[in-house]
Image (spheres, rainbow, N blue to C red):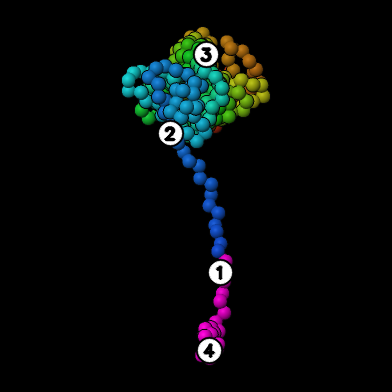
Amino acid sequence: MNLNRAAWRRPFNSRRVRSKTLRFERLEDRLLLATVSWITDSDGFWDVASNWSTGTEPGPNDDVMVDRPAGDFTISHRQGSNSIRSLTSTEAVTLSGGRLNVAATVQVSNTFTMAGGTLANATVLGASGTKLVLTGNGGTLDGVRVDGDLVLGSWATATIVNGLELNGTVTLAEQYSRLDFVGTQTLSGTGAVVFGNFYANAVRVNDAGTTLTIGSGITIRGGSNQGYGARLGYSDYWGGPTNIAVVNLGTISADGSRITLLQGSFTNAGTAEARNGGE
């Protein structure tokens, strides 16, 4: 049998075969967020790993949830530096030491107490009755936004660094309470600072040669007829430098009593008034 090899050839396709190069687009990095829960039906410390659902302290990408229906407990942050994404709690929270950095929001529908330590970068929500209370041990607010209430008790000092955005109300609610602004600062937002009629309360500029700017949406009101009360700028009770400046773009309203401006320089580009017998 004679086989013609040509008969077994495949038909020739004159079309050129074109190759294609696959191209891949790089997408942005995605972080996997996690909810970390308090799992202990008792008071306890933040830095004890076994109190948390992950067996370790919450981290920067974690939304922290504290909700124990079995009772009314207190979670205390006493030491160390911790960063989390958010904090939501139906239990009481106390910041007594260390530093708690919160990238997003804090919402505590219970008592939120500062008795030392630093709260940084957080937005403290006003929803669910969140109220931040400072005791005599005070605390530092570093770049914080307060949408709820901030209450300063007796001998409480709130030290402000990197600005304070206030959209709620700060109340200097008892004697010897004060806001200390460290360095040149701006008090911004749409909220109010209220002086109670108490002894030696103050909104104070802490460092020589620095300026406190009161934003256009801010109201400082109330006043005090008590000794050394309702001082703005420099406090003749607490001392400190006198070569400081206050720039008012908002409203200063001595309502029914006295607000005393003590400073090296005062610039008023807003409203400064006395109402209801104030001065």
Residue that badge 4 annotates: 3
Q: Earlier in the sequence, mark 3 or mark 1?
A: 1
What residue is shown with label 2?
A: 35
* Image location (x, y in percent) of residue 180: 56, 20
CB atoms of marks 4 and 1 within 8 Å:
no
Q: Residue at x 54, y 57 (%)?
A: 25
| Residue highlighted by disc 3 | 137
- Disc 1 marks which amino acid? Lys
Do the numbered discs 4 and 3 sit on residues whose CB atoms are within 8 Å?
Answer: no
Task: Depth check: give the residue in front, 269 or 38.
Answer: 38
Give the alpha-carbon distance from disc 2 to disc 1, as whole Å.
Answer: 45 Å
* Earlier-in-chain disc, 3 versus 2: 2
Mark positioned earlier in the residue sequence (4 or 1): 4
The reply to whether the magenta stretch includes residue 162 is no
| Of labels 3 and 1, the one closer to you | 1
Q: CA distance from mark 3 to mark 1?
A: 70 Å
Kindly identify which numbered label has been placed on residue 20: 1
Q: How many marks?
A: 4
Give, as a three-letter code, the residue at label 4: Leu
Q: Residue drawn at (56%, 62%), measured in percent from left and top?
A: 23
Q: Is residue 52 visible?
A: yes
Residue 213 visible: no
- Identified by mark 2, the residue type is Thr
Amino acid of disc 3: Asn
Q: Which residues are magenta?
A: 1-21
- Label 4 vs 3, first from the N-terminus: 4
